[in-house]
Amino acid sequence: MHALTRLPRAAVAVAVLAACSGSTGPDPPPAGDFTIELAAGDGQTALVNDQLGFPLVVRVTSGTQPASGRMVEWTASSGAGMISAGGATNNLGIATATLQVSSAGTHTITARVAGETDSATFSVTGVTNRAPALVYEKTSAPVTGMHDTYVRDGIAFVSAWDQGLVLYDVGNGMRGGTPANPVEISRILTADNGVAGGRAVHNAWWFHNPVTNERRYVFVGQEGPGVLGVSSSGDIHVVDVSDLTQPHEVAYVTIPGAGTHNFWMDEARQILYAGYYNAGVVAIDVSGTLAGDISSRIVHEVRPGGPGQTYVWGVQLAGTSLWASDMLSGLWQLDPVTLQAVGGYNVPTRYSTDLWVHGNYAYTGTMAGRVPALGVIINVWKIDGTSPVLVDSVSMPEAGIVSDLQVSDDGTLLVATSHGTSSGLVVFSLARPERPAIIGRTTAPVSIHTGEVETIGGKYYVFTRTTSPVSGWQIWEVFPP
């Protein structure tokens, strides 16, 4: 079982070289003045009994030249765990080792060329797992085919796919519900609008309009069939919830040949931003009364990656910028008024997935596909400049996709959900927001597709949809760091 750890971008490249360059090169030089230095893997964090997500990597040189064929001795401090060495240095002078952490605390691992005095020392941290606690689970209809959960004012809007949109009291008070005992308020089956596969209710946003002081509309995303990078389908449906017990559909947005995925609201300006897969980012005026086909209210559209290189997963408004995660072309920074975009083309080896922005940092997920051998990571971006800059990465070695990311409102936690052998629900401390450190993970082999973080009654909760070992709706309590 692997841990989830981080590694700077430059170090990732070194680690890949170490893994891929198996040749030991020419005969080793005689003993002499060798220098050994850290190349990658320092500063990692892992749960106790997990293996570090990235190898420990050193580079050995003789003078200015790589020293191949040299044996490296690895020594761990007491309680660090079990080291597995990767053999002699390769033709780049690179040697590697892996470590399974056996106890909590800060540990050191020292690497030294056999017979030499020079050494390099790594520092790694073991953490006791503070696993999220499952407080509620529903595995019967209507949530068995669900997707996202949107929570606001103690009401959970469950997108239950072909079963429609279902509203639950989870702390609002109108029905006495809690996270441990959700109580249904109402449900609605939105129209299918001719989309193959039926209603396919994927996500929702309850619009709190600060101009009219109304909480009248819920925007519902419909996701139909599509092909990555080529096509998509599904409309935005507008549901009137003036009476939460009697929701009814009043309007819709349709773009021929494209379908919506995740979206975000600029409530002050009354603009809905939608990630529209192959149609890119779409801005829609949702002010006033909404009725019928409101596709004419689209005010701007942009395909940030250009033709054939745009497939936008989601968007988020943060500060003075709109951010978009494009599966094909990476992370983009957009002007929220004009949608003019900068950045992008910055995740060439993986498909990008979900994003979350908080303060001066953005976090984006990935999925396997472009170079499967590289695995799945969470990218960490500095965003206080004119375009995003990649500063760190978190390895998700057992995941096939990071499907959802969210930072808690107070900025202390990053929560990720993922499909995989046992990746599931993963919680990171953001005590250093540029370097997320794992503090907890679901202990059972649970594959989780979506997650919504909410604070209710002073506690953190995550509302998830699991895909295995059972499919359904789960609510987890997450303990603060």
Image (spheres, rainbow, N blue to C red):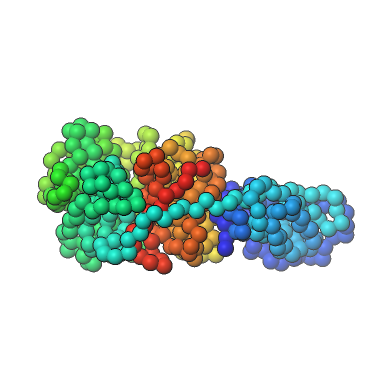
Q: Is residue 320 left or right of residue 99?
A: left
* Depth order, front residue of 409/43: 409
**Quadrant of residue 86 within the rendered picture:** bottom right
Note whether residue 294 is visible. no
Image location of residue 434, percent across then percent down: 53, 41
Going 71% across and 60% down the picture, which residue do you hit?
83
Residue lying at 29% horizontally and 61% vertically, measured from the top left: 143
**Can you say whether 10 is above or below 232 in the image?**
above
Report whether residue 410 is seen: yes
Q: Tell me residue 154's x, y (percent).
A: 29, 44
The quadrant of the picture occupied by the N terminus is bottom right
Residue 367, percent from left and from top:
45, 59
Q: Is residue 99 left or right of residue 308?
A: right
Horizontal side, residue 394 vs residue 241: left or right: right
| Residue at the image position 26 percent from the left and 37 percent from the top | 267
How many discs mark residues in the rendered view?
0
| Residue located farthest toward the left when viewing the structure as drawn | 292
Q: Residue at x 31, y 58 (%)?
A: 147
x and y percentages locating residue 71 in the rendered image: 79, 61
